[in-house]
Image (spheres, helix red, strand yellow):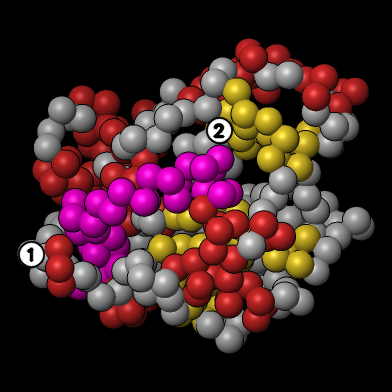
Amino acid sequence: MQSIDFYIKHPYSFLDSLVLHFCQWLPDSEYIKLRYRCQMGNRLNLIRPKTFNEKLQWLKLHDHNPKYTKMVDKVLVKEYVSSIVGAEYIVPLLGVWDRPENIDWTSLPERFVLKTNHSGGNTGVIICRDKSTFDKQKAVSKLNASLKQDIYHNLREWPYKQVKKCVFAEAYIESAPDKKDLPDYKFFCFDGVVKALFVATERQNPNEDVKFDFFDENYNHLTVKQGHENAIVPPSKPKSFEEMKRIAEKLSKGIPHVRVDLYEANGRPLFGEFTFCHFAGMVPFQPAEWDVRFGEWLDLPNDIK
């Protein structure tokens, strides 16, 4: 809960909070317009969208491919990705339960990761590195809170509308035995072509805010920020970078835009998740010209215009 001083300094955030809590009854287009105005500070152009963020809002309203539901379900997507690029790129699944209270703790190894299948970011992710000291009750509480979140109703991201929520456990993975941080490589793909990516670091560091560093398709660092600061030292190019690109492009072929998130564990790539609406299309780029540049890469489908 934000303080009164915060809302005085950021009046649009106060309005956005009101829209989020009291205006979910509005039709998708009107709700999106209101939230976009509050988040971005300008009006949304849905007739002739130009920027990346504008086009993401257009896709929310018009691109309702049924397969997207399976692609954003973190459990069902494993079979989907495996059928396209192979099971060797999948993080092993350890168990699936409809409620956190039903988790079979005895079946889990000493190290594992718990997640909700519908959540975004790290909101529904819990890492266990030592089962003997793991706080199960705290984990159950966090997972239940995550299950209450609704990305479709809050942000109108259509792919999440029909996802049947559950909790699941995955194998614990690490970039290397001597490293605690597990960088997340997020590839912006446009109909099977990688145009850019960003790398999320410091996510496992409780003393640091997550850092985002953007790169072009050849891993040249870009002078762009969005949502988070850059790392003091940009993350180095992963060993499997070219293989990562190949996987991302194969998985995104035929889709106007999707972000393909990958990890590198001991030198080999592993699939993380698909994201159709990066930051819900409601976080400004710095400088703003990058919103236009990304928008130029995204061709809206003619058959659903």
Task: Give the quarter of the figure containing the C terminus.
Answer: bottom left
Mark 2 or 1: in front is 2
Residue 125 in view here: yes
Helix, strand or loop at label 1? It is loop
**Image-based side of 207 in relation to 177, left or right:** left
Disc 1: CA contacts within 10 A as few (<14), some (14-19) or many (>=20)? few
Q: Residue at x 92, y 57 (%)?
A: 178
Q: Residue at x 46, y 63 (%)?
A: 259
Tell me the amino acid under the disc marked 2: Thr
Helix, strand or loop at label 2? It is strand
Using the image, determine if residue 244 lies above or below residue 132.
Answer: below
For disc 2, the marked residue is 116
Using the image, determine if residue 72 lies above or below residue 190.
Answer: above
Q: Position of residue 137 (x, y in %)?
A: 70, 14
Q: Position of residue 61 (x, y in %)?
A: 19, 51
Residue 40 in view here: no
Q: Residue at x 72, y 75 (%)?
A: 240
Residue range (magenta): 50-79
On the image, which quarter does residue 285 sit in?
bottom left
Using the image, determine if residue 295 lies above or below residue 155.
Answer: below
Magenta stretch: residue 68 in it?
yes
On the image, which quarter does residue 271 sit in?
bottom right
Which residue occupies the foreground of this view, 279 or 269? 269
For disc 1, the marked residue is 47
Which residue occupies the foreground of this view, 293 or 270? 270
Using the image, determine if residue 243 lies above or below residue 133.
Answer: below
Tell me the amino acid under the disc marked 1: Ile
**Image-based side of 262 in relation to 111, left or right:** left
Disc 2: CA contacts within 10 A as few (<14), some (14-19) or many (>=20)? many
